[in-house]
Every structure is written in C-alpha cells, then in structure tokens.
Amino acid sequence: MLSVIVDARGEARRLPALLAQLTAAAVEGLIKEVFLVAPHSDAVAAICEEMGAEPADTIEQALAWAKSELVLVAAPELRLRDGWVEALGEHLASGGGSALVEGVGGGGLFGKRPPYGVLVERGRVARLEDPDLKRLRRQLGLRPLRVG
C-alpha cells in the first residue's frame, strides 16, 4: 500500500479528476491515504471532504503524516492510463521500487513531457530540502514507469 501526496499549490482546479482516479486504487487497497498540499480555502476543504483526502500545508507535513513507506507525489494534472491500478499493483508486488509514473498527455508540436508523479520511498523524500516534483525527478534520477 502507498500514500499519495498531490502537490496542488499552483493548480487546484484540476484536482477532482485525479482524485476520482485515485479512488479506484483506494477501493482496490493499493492506496492507503491521499494528502492534498494546497493553500487553505473553502473549495480545497470541500474537495478533501468529498474525496476523502487530508489537507496539508507542505509536502514535508504530508510526509510526516504518511503511514506508508512508499509515497506517490503527483501534480493535479496527472491523468493515468486505463489499467493503471493493475499495472502499479504488479510493479509493487514484483518488488519494484522508486519510479517516475508517466501519465497521459504531453507530446504535441513542441514535445511537452506528459504529466508525471514520483513513486519513491518516504525516507528518500524526507531527506530533501523543500521537495517538489521537479526537484524529486531531477535529484532522484528515476526511471520511467508507464502504468496502464
């Protein structure tokens, strides 16, 4: 099981679509909990209550509260492929560890990277100063994992 930390400090309006996708994994028992890192607002509080997420002020705070040793840190624009729950479950069951979880989208004329999340051991993230997705990807040098 893993904990999910959604870093929505810059973009909270895309949250419901990602949180809806994460619900399927929670039902399957793959996700234990979801933390939402976002500025406090009535809208964020409502999303957390409706989707069963916990609000957090920072990634560090969410890490401190996380119960799983493995965390997925994701941006709110991450959209996962069909079959991602099974693919991620197989990755974890086979002993797969840290990885870059690529979502759908991106590409296009200028080759924009697809949205992604970082699947990593909680302790590795906790050792970083002021972690965010770009810093995690750069500092941890993770290999891509296409789920689904």
Image: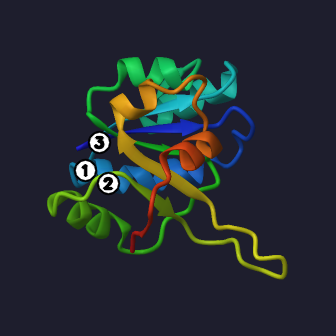
| Residue neighbourhood size for the residue with mark 3, other residues' Cα within 10 Å, grouped as few (<14), some (14–19), many (≥20) | many
Identify residue for label 3. Answer: 2
Residue 85, given in percent of the width and then of the height, sits at 32, 63
Tag on residue 30? 1
Q: Are marks 2 and 1 in contact (CB under 8 Å)?
A: yes
Identify residue for label 2. Answer: 25
Q: Residue at x 37, y 68 (%)?
A: 84
Q: Secondary structure at mark 1?
A: loop
| Residue neighbourhood size for the residue with mark 1, other residues' Cα within 10 Å, grouped as few (<14), some (14–19), many (≥20) | some
The quarter in which the N terminus is drawn is top left
Who comes first in sequence, dot 2 or dot 1? 2
**Label 2, label 1: how far apart the Cα atoms are:** 5 Å
Name above or below for residue 128 compared with residue 78: above
Task: Name the outermost residue toward the bottom.
Answer: 109
Residue type, mark 3 in image: Leu
Q: Are marks 3 and 1 in contact (CB under 8 Å)?
A: yes
Question: Where is residue 67, by image quadrant?
Answer: top left
Residue 26, given in percent of the width and then of the height, sits at 30, 47
**Label 2, label 3: how far apart the Cα atoms are:** 10 Å
Residue type, mark 2 in image: Ala
Who comes first in sequence, dot 3 or dot 1? 3
Who comes first in sequence, dot 2 or dot 3? 3
Name above or below for residue 77 compared with residue 47: below
Q: Would residue 111 appear left or right of 121 to someone viewing this image?
A: right
**Label 3, label 1: how far apart the Cα atoms are:** 6 Å
Q: Secondary structure at mark 3?
A: strand
Q: Secondary structure at mark 2?
A: helix
Q: Residue at x 45, y 23 (%)?
A: 62
